[in-house]
Amino acid sequence: MDNDCVDTKRKTIFLVDDNITNLTMGRNVLTKHYNIATVDSGERMLKMLEKTIPDMILLDVEMPEMNGYDAIKIMKSKKETQNIPIIFLTAKNDVDSELEGLSLGAIDYIIKPFSPPLLLKRIETHLLVESQRKELLNYNKNLQKLVEAKTRTVLELQNAILKAMAELVENRDDITGKHVERTQSYLNLLIGAMLKCGLHAEEIRNWNIDLVLRSSQLHDVGKIAVRDDILKKNGKLTEEEFNEIKKHPICGEEIIEKIKQNTTEHEFLEHAKIFAATHHEKWDGSGYPKGLKGEEIPLQGRLMSIADVYDALVSDRPYKKAFPHEEAVKIISENRGTHFDPDLVDIFLEISDKFNETAKLFQAK
């Protein structure tokens, strides 16, 4: 290898041929322009590739022991060498041989004896194309990193806005203790258990679960429209006051729909709207605001119903003290098939201990 004083700014080319005359001629033509390594067999070339990856290989087709076709097959099968540009050198001048080389991944075919100016021009052209390919690849990688960074920034901003809106609602409702975060955790437990046992798995697999969980933060956003004296009342609500409370799912749905009309992020907001509009519907049709029954209630609403009620039961509220976990489980179990989807209650009962663990973790914070 002619690399006693290798110029690292110049491109490196392997010239592979079993004929010493061809190697000498090629080296004399190319050495003024490139770092040239002359190799007299395919086997030695593969050995050299373990230490040095050149910018291009000029590879003779007809060599003993390992011909050019066999050598290129080996190079293309390895990640480290599969992208090296290869130009075949051959004395054959037939279409079939040329097609075979190109189909194996060669970028060009030069007939021997070659014209030095033509050889130099072909190499120059292909090295330029390869350089541009690498630049485009690097550009795409950098662009992808920028897009990912921008996406993270947007998601962080979105989460911050959602959290602020959710906390605004919680503060007005005098609900301290991270109600939104807890219900998200309960939903995550339910969805995970459903996927594990296959319940509604086909529908859930079509969800972006992270998106669904984040959208659930807006389930009570409609309470913004409810008066403080009703939200913070220490005692039983009158019928008129309860009717005001019952408006918050519709208000939430309308608020999210207005946001939806001014954005292109419809999937996230569609889930949020469903959570807001349907989390107080009941399996037997006695819920509000629309009196939906059974599977008329979207799955998101049926899930949030359990998560929301469990959290209300085990948490202190202005009108009640927290129930023990066991009492909350009993109440939800007793309302299987009336308030709650019976299949989802069965799932809840199987993992209710995880609900309890989650509630305790939040209490410890």
Image (cartoon, helix red, strand yellow):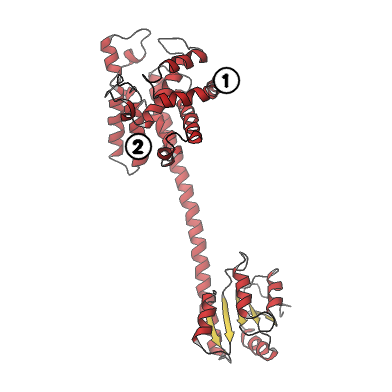
Label 2 neighbourhood size at 10 Å, few (<14), some (14-19), many (20+)? many
Q: How many marks?
A: 2
**Number of the label disc, if any, that sits on residue 269:** 2
The secondary element bearing badge 2 is classed as helix
Name which residue lies at 50% across and 68% down.
Answer: 133
- Extreme right residue here? 4
Using the rendered view, name the quadrant where residue 50 is placed: bottom right
Residue at x-position 32% and y-position 13%: 230
Residue 157 position in % (x across, y down) = 43, 38
> Looking at this view, is 70 or 365 the one in front?
70
Q: Quadrant of the N terminus?
A: bottom right
Amino acid type for the residue under numbered disc 1? Ala
Does residue 12 appear in the picture of this structure?
no
Q: Is residue 18 left or right of residue 118?
A: right
Is any part of residue 183 visible from this angle? yes
Residue displayed at 51% across by 14% down: 326
Give residue 52's position: percent from left, percent from top.
Answer: 68, 70
Name the residue nearer the viewer: 365 or 290. 290
Residue 350 or 26: which is nearer the viewer? Answer: 350
Label of residue 364 in the image: 1
| Residue 84: percent from left, percent from top | 59, 71
Q: Nearer the viewer, residue 335 or 226?
A: 335
Q: Quadrant of residue 226?
A: top left
Secondary structure found at label 1 = helix
x%, y% of residue 78?
Answer: 62, 66
**Image quarter hosting the C terminus:** top right
Which three-letter amino acid code belongs to the residue tagged 2?
A: Leu
Residue 313 is drawn in which quadrant? top left
